[in-house]
Amino acid sequence: MLDIRNLDLSLPDLTERLCKISNRLYTMHSSCSFSAREYRVLERMHEIIQKGMDGLTQ
């Protein structure tokens, strides 16, 4: 996964990129079969991205 800390993006561009990553993760875990551990990792990544997006838009 891309490390967004080193990207030089404007706030709207960063928010858009985070939204795309978040949507991809959600699509992956809803359409594929994952082990319990993989599912927990995807859920946690989704939570982290959502919190980051919420923090950026406030």
Image: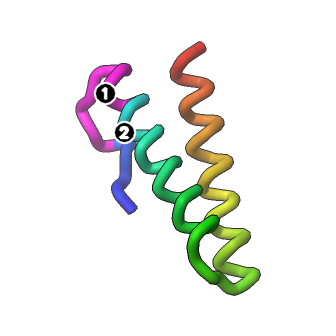
Q: Is residue 53 above or below residue 22?
A: above
Q: Was residue 56 drawn as part of the magenta stretch in this picture?
A: no
Disc 2 marks which amino acid? Arg
Disc 1 marks which amino acid? Asp
| Apparent side of residue 22 relative to residue 36 in the rendered image (left or right) | left
Q: Residue at x 34, y 56 (%)?
A: 2
Q: What stretch of residues is rendered in magenta?
A: 6-14
Query: Looking at the picture, how far across and down is residue 56, in whole percent?
Result: 52, 22
Quadrant of the drawing holding the N terminus? bottom left
Determine whether the residue tagged by mark 2 lies in a helix, strand or loop: helix
Tell me the residue that label 1 is attached to.
13
Q: Was residue 8 drawn as part of the magenta stretch in this picture?
A: yes
- Numbered badge on residue 55: none
Q: Residue at x 71, y 80 (%)?
A: 37
Q: Are marks 2 and 1 in contact (CB under 8 Å)?
A: yes
Q: Residues within 10 Å of mark 2 (few under 14, many from 20)?
A: some
| Apparent side of residue 56 relative to residue 7 in the rendered image (left or right) | right
Tell me the residue that label 2 is attached to.
17
Query: Looking at the picture, how far across and down is residue 42, in whole percent?
Result: 62, 65
